[in-house]
Each structure stands twice: as structure tokens, then as C-alpha cells.
Amino acid sequence: MNLAEASNVAKRMLGNQWVKWIHRGSAPANTATEKNMNVINSSINPKHCASCLNMNGCYFVKDKSPENPLHEHCHCYYEAIGIPDVTAASAIEKFTKYIFNDTIDDGKKELFERWGYTLIDSSALQKEFEKQAQLSYQCGDYVLGKRTGHERINIVMRLKRKNSRQEVTFDTGWMVYPDGKLLLITPYGGK
Ligand SMILES: [Zn+2]
């Protein structure tokens, strides 16, 4: 990153107002299992909305935050927070067993191979995805997901082709977790 780029990033970072979704009286869901438990529990006992429970403690840029109230009788609210520290994580299997999977014939593997990436690049791709997602989230450069669950965001990934100077861009899908954490769900969501 050169100086002009760094100053642009800083400007984007500082230009956002952040909010935290609060569902008072319930513990934040910090893992996929805990999120799933909320979905299961609320289907058995619809007293609490699973989406609301799963957004508890999640950070959003104010003008790109899920609507609140989310539904009738929603008691959730937003609390203004300062610019948060955020992190992005991804499982290596999203690359080794999903993108570079020989048994799924959906064109993902061929696509990445056309860009010069193969299975042995999985770990490098994982680091690159995490780095870019963290920076984009920190700058508020994301789009709220429209799929089920309200705490999903899409982030545009830019990759240099290994075999040419061209860059490719495509969508990736991330789940928002409490305290500024992202977890990769969809490593290739189309262009
Ligand atoms: Zn609610």
C-alpha cells in the first residue's frame, strides 16, 4: 500500500459511524453451533427471534445495518460504538475442500486454476481473503446480505491473477459474529 492508498483507507475508516445490535438479557452467539442453537430453540419456542439473538453483539456501519426494529415486538436496539477493531477468519477447508474440490463439478476449481491458483495456494488464498475482508469490513466496504439470517455480509475480493497482471473481482459471503468478528461462509459467490 502506498501513502496515497493508506491515507484513502484511513479516510474511509474514519468516515463511518458504527453501531452494535443489542438483544438485552441474552448471551451473544459466538460460534456457528450457538447460532444454530438459537435457530433450533426459536423454532421450538418462538418467544425470541433467532435473527435478533444471532445479531446480539454484532457490529455494523450505521448506514449499512439491518433494520431495527426487525419485526413486531422486537425489543432490540442499537448502541453507538467507536471505530471497532475487527478480525476476519476462514477455515482452510473452504479452499482445500470447497474451491479445489475435484468431486464437485461447479466450475469453481477451473475458474481459480484459470487465474493460476491451485490446491497448494489454499493457505495463501486463506490469508489473502482474511486480510482483504478485515480491511473492507473496517472501512465499511460491504453489502448487507439478503439471504436468511440478517447478519450476513458480502465483500468484494480482488485477486491478482498469478499468470498475468490482470485482477479479478468477485463476491464473497461472511457471517458477522459479536465483537467485530467475521467468518467466511462463501468463498466464491459469483462476479
Ligand atoms: Zn429483536
Image (cartoon, rainbow, N blue to C red):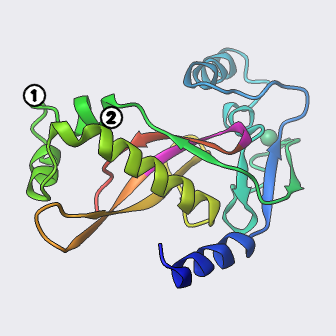
Q: Is residue 40 above or below residue 4?
A: above
Name the residue tied to disc 2: 94
Counting from the top left corner in percent of width and height, residue 17 is at 79, 67
Name the residue tied to disc 1: 103
Label 1 sits on a secondary structure element that is loop
Residue 174 part of the magenta segment: yes
Marks 2,1: beta carbons within 8 A: no
Distance in Å between CA atoms under marks 2 and 1: 14 Å
Q: Callout 2: 10 Å neighbours few (<14), some, many (20+)?
A: some
Q: Amino acid at mark 1?
A: Thr
Ligand 1's quadrant is top right
Counting from the top left corner in percent of width and height, residue 76 is at 85, 43
Q: Amino acid at mark 2?
A: Lys
80 left or right of 68 in image:
right
- The residue positioned farthest toward the front in the image shown: 3
| Dominant secondary structure (helix, strand or loop) of the stretch shown in magenta | strand
What residue range appears in magenta? 173-179
For disc 2, does the CB lie below 8 Å from ligand 1? no
